[in-house]
Image (cartoon, coloured by chain):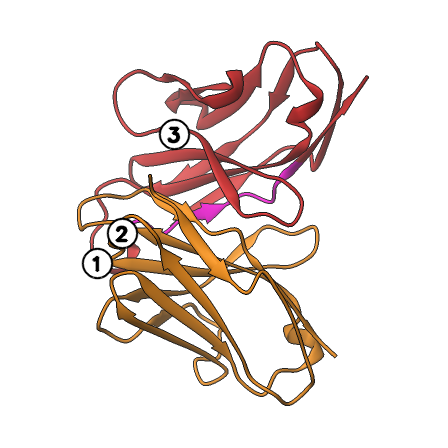
Chain colours: A red, B orange
Amino acid sequence: AQSVTQLGSHVSVSEGALVLLRCNYSSSVPPYLFWYVQYPNQGLQLLLKYTTGATLVKGINGFEAEFKKSETSFHLTKPSAHMSDAAEYFCAVTPANAGGTSYGKLTFGQGTILTVHP
Amino acid sequence: GAVVSQHPSRVICKSGTSVKIECRSLDFQATTMFWYRQFPKKSLMLMATSNEGSKATYEQGVEKDKFLINHASLTLSTLTVTSAHPEDSSFYICSARGASGTYEQYFGPGTRLTVT
């Protein structure tokens, strides 16, 4: 079974400041990890993903995340926040190489609302 | 590429009526579609997984007779909320996954259902 914990339901930063959104996961098998962004009344847009290979992954809009197996973490960062980054962010996990009905099923964290102040 | 649409984007219906929500993959064939429900200020809860041409697999606690899912073609899945009640009011989001062997899901824009 998988679970995802996002520390901090709300994060507030100033424009130009570092953005750090925390995600820890629990998985009995190697995971694939994702970060999604959701703007009000819209669906989810994929920011980035980790499957295999390089543990530091870069996504859209200047975001990146690092898979740290020893810490079971996949924190999302952006060096300099922009007003347009204000949204809700979800971390998600799916078991790698799972078969049957578990294949590709995403387990989401609770979400973190990012507010960016001028 | 990989665009998923939902229709309608918003719907208001009266208690006791049924409402159908469509999810379409516009530029790829979706062998699997997922239906999620999102409560206000909450995360996404997976309701069911549907594979084209077969019955949907519902998550524990989801009433299959209330939330009817049909995945009749490789580009269309529908969710019908039967005998809707105010507590069914929510944001419903679908996602679609392509051919077997791929894991990435593409999400629709969501449907806001309000039952009065």
Badge 3, how many Cα within 10 Å: few under 14, some, many 20+? many
From the viewer's perspective, tell me whether residue A71 is left or right of residue B54. right
Viewer-nearest of labels 3 and 1?
3
| Nearer-the-camera pick, B22 or A64 | B22
Q: Chain of mark 2?
A: A
Residue B13 in the image: state x and y as whole percent. 66, 79
Marks 3 and 1, Cα distance to the nearest angstrom? 22 Å
Q: Which of the 4 image quarters holds residue A86? A: top right
Q: Quadrant of residue B22?
A: bottom left
Q: Is residue A108 magenta?
A: yes
The amino acid sitting under disc 2 is Tyr
Q: Which mark is residue A100?
A: 1
**For mark 1, does the 10 Å Cα neighbourhood hold few (<14), some (14 to 19), or many (20 or more) residues?**
few
Q: What residue is drawn where x is 66% and y is 82%? A: B85
Residue bearing mark 2: A103
Circle 3 SS class: strand
**Circle 3 residue:** A49
Q: Earlier in the sequence, mark 3 or mark 1?
A: 3
Q: Which residues are magenta?
A: A104-112
Q: Main secondary structure of the magenta part?
A: loop
- Image height of A79 relative to B80, above or below: above
Q: Looking at the image, which residue is at 47% across and 26% down? A: A73
x, y percent for residue B95:
41, 53
Q: Secondary structure at mark 1?
A: helix
Question: Which residue is depicted at the point 65% across and 59% down?
Answer: B39
Mark 2: give few (<14), some (14-19) or many (20+) Cα within 10 Å: some
Q: Are marks 1 and 2 on the same chain?
A: yes
Disc 1 and disc 2 in contact, CB within 8 angstroms? yes
Q: Are marks 2 and 3 on the same chain?
A: yes
